[in-house]
């Protein structure tokens, strides 16, 4: 199983990889110089990857400004928590701001809404 990373850092890494993927796709288009349409398609796909990266960076920037800042009890670094549980961006210490999850084993599924919780909310309205 892959080690869990901080959500903000994981999304930023994805956006950075989109930039590199876009550049590689555009570079691959150079090999089709004789066929302008194919080269144009590769160039357009590369630009779309870079635009998607820009949108992803803007989106995670907006999320990052609203994220709760906490001091990690393990390393003392200031980090941001997105969701109910997250990892420290510096030392990967599991963090939570939900008192019900204090002391429980770290599980990424705590960030997903459970069916029982959504059923309780829908019947109480």
Image: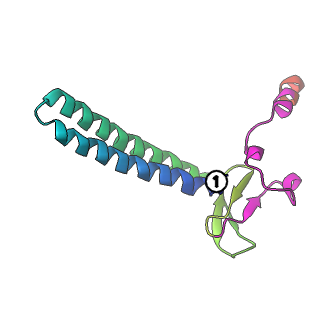
**Quadrant of the rendered structure where residue 28 is?**
top left
Q: Which residues are magenta?
A: 91-119
Residue 115 colored magenta? yes
- Figure coloring: rainbow
Furthest toward the left, the residue is 34
Q: Position of residue 22 (x, y in %)?
A: 33, 44
Judged from the image, the secondary structure of the residue bearing numbered disc 1 is: loop
Would you call the spot at circle 1 few (<14 residues within 10 Å), some (14-19), or many (20 or more)?
Answer: few
Choose between 120 and 110: the one closer to the eye. Answer: 110
| Residue depicted at 14% across the width and 30% down the height | 36
| Residue depicted at 64% across the width and 60% down the height | 80
Q: Position of residue 35 (x, y in %)?
A: 14, 29
Q: Position of residue 121 (x, y in %)?
A: 84, 30
Q: Which residue is mark 1?
A: 2
Residue 113 colored magenta? yes
Choose between 72 and 46: the one closer to the eye. Answer: 46
Asked if residue 102 is positioned above or below residue 17 in the image, the reply reads below
Asked if residue 5 is positioned above or below residue 23 in the image, the reply reads below
Q: Position of residue 98 (x, y in %)?
A: 82, 53
Choose between 1 and 100: the one closer to the eye. Answer: 1
Instruction: Count all numbered tags in the image, as a single digit.
Output: 1
Asked if residue 94 is positioned above or below residue 55 in the image, the reply reads below
Q: Split into 4 quadrants, where in the image is the C terminus?
A: top right
Q: Is residue 103 left or right of residue 88?
A: right
| Residue depicted at 73% across the width and 40% down the height | 112
| Residue depicted at 10% across the width and 33% down the height | 34
């Amino acid at each position: 199983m892959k080690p869990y990373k901080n959500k903000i850092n994981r999304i930023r890494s994805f956006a950075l990889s989109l930039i590199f993927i876009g550049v590689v796709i555009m570079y691959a288009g150079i090999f089709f110089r004789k066929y302008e349409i194919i080269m144009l398609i590769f160039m357009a796909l590369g630009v779309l990857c870079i635009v998607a990266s820009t949108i992803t960076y803007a989106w995670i920037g907006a999320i990052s400004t609203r994220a709760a800042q906490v001091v990690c009890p393990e390393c003392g670094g200031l980090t941001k928590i997105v969701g109910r549980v997250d990892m420290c961006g510096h030392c990967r210490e599991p963090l939570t701001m939900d008192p019900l999850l204090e002391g429980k084993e770290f599980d990424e599924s705590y960030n997903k809404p459970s069916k029982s919780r959504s059923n309780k909310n829908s019947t109480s309205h």
